[in-house]
Amino acid sequence: MSFTVAIVGRPNVGKSTLFNRLVGKKLALVDDTPGVTRDRRPGDARLIDLRFTIVDTAGLEEAHEESLQGRMRAQTEAAIDEADLSLFVVDAKTGLTPVDTALAEMLRRRGKPVILVANKSEARGSDAGFYDAYSLGLGEPTPISAEHGQGMLDLRDAIVAALGEERAFPPKEDVAVTDVDIPQSTGADDEEEEEPAYDDSKPLRVAIVGRPNAGKSTLINRFLGEDRLLTGPEAGITRDSISVEWDWRGRMIKMFDTAGMRRKAKVIEKLEKLSVADALRAIRFAELVVVVFDATIPFEKQDLHIVDLVLREGRAAVLAFNKWDMIEDPQAVLADLREKTDRLLPQARGIRAVPISGQTGRGLDKLMQSIIDTDKVWNKRISTARLNRWLEQQQVQHPPPAVSGRRIKLKYMTQVKARPPAFMISCTRSDALPESYTRYLINGLRADFDMPSVPIRIHYRSPDNPYESKKRRT
């Protein structure tokens, strides 16, 4: 992207609505409650012919530095310092407040370009608030309606005027023809299909989930080496699913911090429901999910529900037992956690579990290695020839049951997809095959092909009977 723009203003003036309008998606949570946004949320914005990075920020308020509002303010000020331009949003409908005046003074002191945006200008009686905005001394306000998309052309012109055309429209880089790799055909066909190698150059999407106050945001901050996400002793600080990118040993990692998920019966407020729904979307979008447990109170019922939800969504999972620095007898606790993991999560046999400390950074390299290893299994493909040899051995060791005196025959097996691994078996009377035999095959796949911790799907297909549609002769 050519430049970065931060959206700032006091709470409930429509910053997140404007952010969603510019990125073209409903990424940020929007509600009538002031202070919904707490963390910085970046996004790829498109405004007519402009392309830039937009950053949604928390509403600026006067508060003590150690309070939650004070920490939110520090995050917003960091976004202003990193941005090339700030959109200072005021509410033309309700008019100016003393907080708006204080924020205008703070933006002036920073000496960076600022565009004054008068939102909700379509409302009746908004003219007075619009003209009052001149008193802030930040130039002519730009009237818009973020909710209805009005005034976007004027906003585009204001951004170009503030940055200049050279900065707003950087020249495009030409790609040399020699930089393009053209695959060459070998002209030879292998008798047995090759199993594709794992591509470790692709960016990896990882979602961090868990109960409230398990230390998810602290863990990501420790990975990044900076206080990028808002943290604190209060439970439920994170509301939006915030994505951050960083490099780990040459591999691009995109992590999603999510809101803590409580039991469904306890989620009453509309805003918390929106936060949980946003966390579920992050799980579906991710390739791998790290479920963060509080090591001081592990294996709560909600922890087990979250792991089961991740596996049912078909995502690979890794368990992270956080706050390990608070454990007094690590060896005894670790042995107990291993026993409970095998006993309470039988559907995730072999799942990788790593003791970590987001506060001190202990175990983070081991956690990242477990993430990479699990993702390799999640992307694994097995050749059809190997699968059919394996299937024949399984039937010899443990034949399928006989139903009504006739033995079920498993004829052919192939892998239909990866991410997660899914297999198709052609067999007779697939509807009569018991669930226990499917579990036997899944456990065999895990053991013989080294596929622990990821969900495995097996589907059955019965061949068509060519005589089924013909009438019986008399």
Image (cartoon, grey):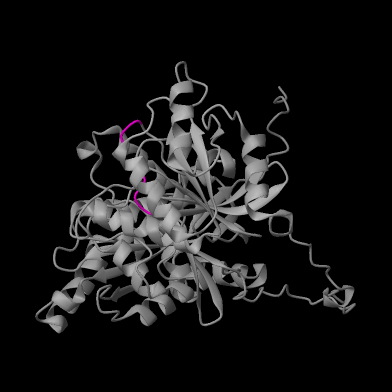
The image quarter in which residue 199 lies? bottom right
Residue 161 shows in the view? yes
Residue 219 position in % (x across, y down): 32, 69
Q: Nearer the viewer, residue 32 or 340?
A: 32
Residue 36 position in % (x across, y down): 34, 41
Looking at the rendering, the stretch of residues picked out in magenta corresponds to 32-39
Point 82% across, 76% down: residue: 179
Q: Look at the picture and state if 285 lies above or below 149.
A: below
The image quadrant where one finds the N terminus is bottom right
Q: Look at the picture and state if 156 lies above or below 230.
A: above
| Number of numbered discs visible in the structure rendering | 0
Q: Nearer the viewer, residue 473 or 94?
A: 94
Point 83% across, 68% down: residue: 174
Q: Nearer the viewer, residue 169 or 390?
A: 169
Point 55% across, 54% down: residue: 113
The image quarter in which residue 22 lies? top right
Q: Is residue 23 magenta?
A: no
Residue 240 shows in the view? no
- 185 left or right of 123? right
